[in-house]
Amino acid sequence: MADSTDKVVMEQSLVKIDEAFVYRIPPMKSADGHRAEDWNLAKPLATCKLEALRRDNSLCINIMADRPKPGAPAGATETYLFAQSNI
């Protein structure tokens, strides 16, 4: 039986993107701000999956990446949390 202090958390998937590119953004060169042409767009830091979730009144953005799975056959991968932002 559930305790009266248990909180129910509502979670809703807002969007899933199967291919999202992550770039290393260099320091600003001037007060004009960042320029995408300085990011080396041809060579992203990682190619990931992006998911935006609503948890109650919060937004959670998860960036997931794949890596080789240790101790598994060649070509086997596992998905791991590359980055997360809670708003």
Image (cartoon, rainbow, N blue to C red):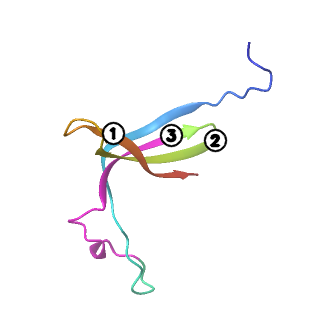
**Residue appearing at x 41%, y 81% in the figure:** 28
Q: Mark 2, residues whose alpha carbon is within 10 Å: few (<14), some, or many (≥20)?
A: few
Q: Residue furthest bottom?
A: 30
The image's mark for residue 57 is: 2
**Residue appearing at x 61%, y 44% in the figure:** 58
Q: Nearer the viewer, residue 2 or 14?
A: 2
**Distance between mark 1 and mark 3 Cα atoms:** 21 Å
Q: Is residue 22 above or below residue 81?
A: below
**Residue appearing at x 27%, y 62% in the figure:** 44
Disc with the residue nearer the chain's start (2 vs 1): 2
Q: Is residue 44 above or below residue 60?
A: below
What residue is pinned by disc 1? 78
* Image coords of residue 47 (percent x, y): 29, 52
* Image coords of residue 4 (percent x, y): 80, 21
Q: Mark 3, residues whose alpha carbon is within 10 Å: few (<14), some, or many (≥20)?
A: some
Q: Are marks 2 and 1 in contact (CB under 8 Å)?
A: no
Q: Is residue 47 magenta?
A: yes
User: Callout 1: helix, strand or loop?
Assistant: strand
User: Callout 3: helix, strand or loop?
Assistant: strand
For residue 21, what is the image quadrant? Answer: bottom left
* Image coords of residue 65 (percent x, y): 35, 47
On-image quarter of the N terminus = top right
* Image coords of residue 55 (percent x, y): 59, 38
Range drawn in magenta? 34-53
| Between marks 2 and 1 in the image, the one whose residue lies nearer the viewer | 1
**Residue appearing at x 29%, y 38% in the figure:** 71
The image's mark for residue 53 is: 3
Q: Looking at the picture, which amino acid does disc 1 mark?
A: Glu
Q: Nearer the viewer, residue 37 or 1?
A: 1
User: Callout 2: helix, strand or loop?
Assistant: loop
**Distance between mark 2 and mark 1 Cα atoms:** 30 Å
